Image (tube, rainbow, N blue to C red):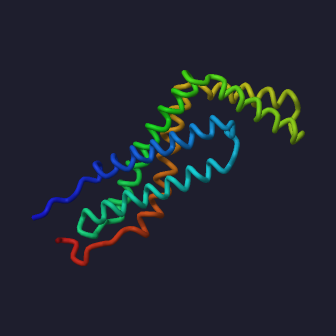
Amino acid sequence: MNEQPSTARVALKWGVIFGLVLMAITLVMYLTDQTTNPLFSGLTLGAMVAFLVLSMREFRSLNGGYMAYGEGLGLGALTSAVGGILSSAFTTFYNVVIDPTVQQRALEKAREKLEEQGSMSDEAIDQAMEMSEKFQSPGFTFIAGVFGTLIVGFLLSLIVAAFIRRNKANPFD
């Protein structure tokens, strides 16, 4: 009887690499002051899909060419969680220790955008900014980053696992 490969081991490997890539993307975004640039959101999403595919393909090849849908889904969620923890820890560290002004600059840009739109009164803009500041604590941003990455990763895993899975002809083998 051959042993089945561990989804946790594969997820840990690809999750760490994914987390490092997310850290690099975040660092470039902060250093170029492009926190509101949608290109970085697309780049992050593309990296997530790529690492989900890579992790599922490796698991499938280690498992004799087979991977059940549920295994792929669990693998994708775990890979996303590991990457999200690393990325969120880095982002929190960067925002607290390296450059604490990042969040303040982002709030100022958001205020400018709201003022340019002209659809809100000054009082409503002030209220929106106060509410945004409440969600800028390091603990909240860390937890939101981890859960955000996990949820998006899980949703993408629903799709990716459907394409990567390959069931055994005899499920009792």
Apparent side of residue 73 relative to residue 43 in the rendered image (left or right): left
Q: Look at 28% across and 49% down and name the residue there.
A: 9
Apparent side of residue 151 relative to residue 109 in the rendered image (left or right): left
User: Quick one: quadrant of the C terminus?
Assistant: bottom left
Q: Look at 39% across and 47% down and name the residue there.
A: 15
Apparent side of residue 35 relative to residue 97 in the rendered image (left or right): right
Q: In the image, residue 88 lies at what x, y percent?
A: 50, 35
Q: Look at 56% across and 43% down and name the residue there.
A: 25
Q: Is residue 28 shown above or below 8?
A: above
Q: Residue furthest bottom?
A: 169
Q: Total marks drawn?
A: 0
Q: In the image, residue 69 lies at what x, y percent?
A: 36, 64
Apparent side of residue 7 relative to residue 122 in the rendered image (left or right): left
Q: Is residue 83 shown above or below 30?
A: below
User: Quick one: quadrant of the N terminus?
Assistant: bottom left
Q: In the image, residue 148 lies at what x, y percent?
A: 53, 43
Q: In the image, residue 53 lies at what x, y percent?
A: 42, 61
Q: Look at 37% across and 57% down and name the residue there.
A: 55
Residue 46 location, quadrant: bottom right
